[in-house]
Structures are given as C-alpha cells and as structure tokens.
Amino acid sequence: MNEIKCQVCRVVMGTCSNDWTGYGICQDCCPCCLRTKTELQLPKHLKPTDKIFEAMLKEISHASSKYPPFHSMHEGYAVILEELDELKEAIWKSKGVRLNPVAAKEAIQVAAMTVRFILDLEGEKE
C-alpha cells in the first residue's frame, strides 16, 4: 500500500475531519486542528475554502517538500525576514496601487513561513 506522508511532519497521514489532506498536511499539523494543541483559533470570517488560506497552505506544502524543517528559531527568522524584504520591495515598486499580485504573493509567503516557523519549532527548548 502506498502511504502518504504529511508535508509538514512527514508522519503517515490518517484522515482529517477538516480535509486538509488534499494539501498534503495531516490532521496533527492542520491549521484547523492545531487549535486543539496550541489553542489557536481562526477568525470566524476565515474558512478553509478561502483562496488566500488555500494559497498559504499550498505554499507551506511546497516549501516543506522542497526544504527541510527549520533547524532553529534564528534560521526561521531569517527566512521570514527574507520574505518580508521581498514584500517590502514589491510594495515600494507599486506606488499608488492598493494591492498588486506580486505583493499579494509575497504576503502569502510571509504568512506561510510564519506558520511553518511555529510548526517546525513547536516544543523547541532554548
């Protein structure tokens, strides 16, 4: 049998009641299910079907399949800062525009790497 592993934690996936498995993320790493572990809750206006949230999950999945987990908080911070600098550059290049597609993509990447930071380093001791 072909086992499917979570893109975040690499554990063989079961089924998730919120169906994040389509994104390659298991129930234990699913942002909806994480609230039971970390007491995080999504704002009521956000639903798993929102395209922004879907884009963030795809970015987490893509980055997790391409790069290993963050080794430290310093490495995670550096990646987030790099994405934030790319967002800043996109904003500066689009003066007078409320939101352009490049800035939106960079903002999604900042959010995705911030979530990945928490997922990769949860439980790390200083």
Image (spheres, rainbow, N blue to C red):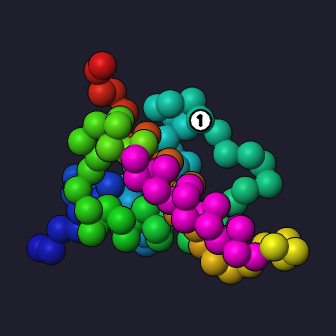
Is 85 placed above or below 32 here?
Answer: below
Question: With 50 as the anchor, is 99 left or right in this view?
Answer: right
Counting from the top left corner in percent of width and height, residue 32 is at 55, 49
User: Is 82 in front, or is 12?
Assistant: 82
Counting from the top left corner in percent of width and height, residue 63 is at 36, 65
Residue at figure coordinates x 55%, y 37% from the top left: 35
Question: With 5 as the anchor, is 114 left or right in this view?
Answer: right
Question: With 108 as the anchor, is 34 left or right in this view?
Answer: left
Kindly identify which residue carries mark 1: 40
User: Is 103 in front, or is 39?
Assistant: 103
In the rendered view of the protein, which quadrant contains the N terminus? bottom left
Name of the residue lying farthest toward the top: 126
Residue at figure coordinates x 28%, y 37% from the top left: 72
What crowding class fits label 1: few (fewer than 14 Cα within 10 Å), some (14-19), or many (20 or more)?
few
Which kind of residue does numbered mark 1 sit on? Leu
Name of the residue lying farthest toward the left: 1
Q: Main secondary structure of the magenta part?
A: helix
Q: Which segment is the magenta one?
A: 78-94
Is 74 placed above or below 69 here?
Answer: above
Residue 97 found in image quarter: bottom right
Q: Secondary structure at mark 1?
A: loop
Residue at figure coordinates x 29%, y 46% from the top left: 70
Is 60 placed above or below 33 here?
Answer: below
Q: Is residue 108 visible?
A: no
Q: Is residue 111 visible?
A: yes
Decide whether residue 81 is among the magenta residues: yes
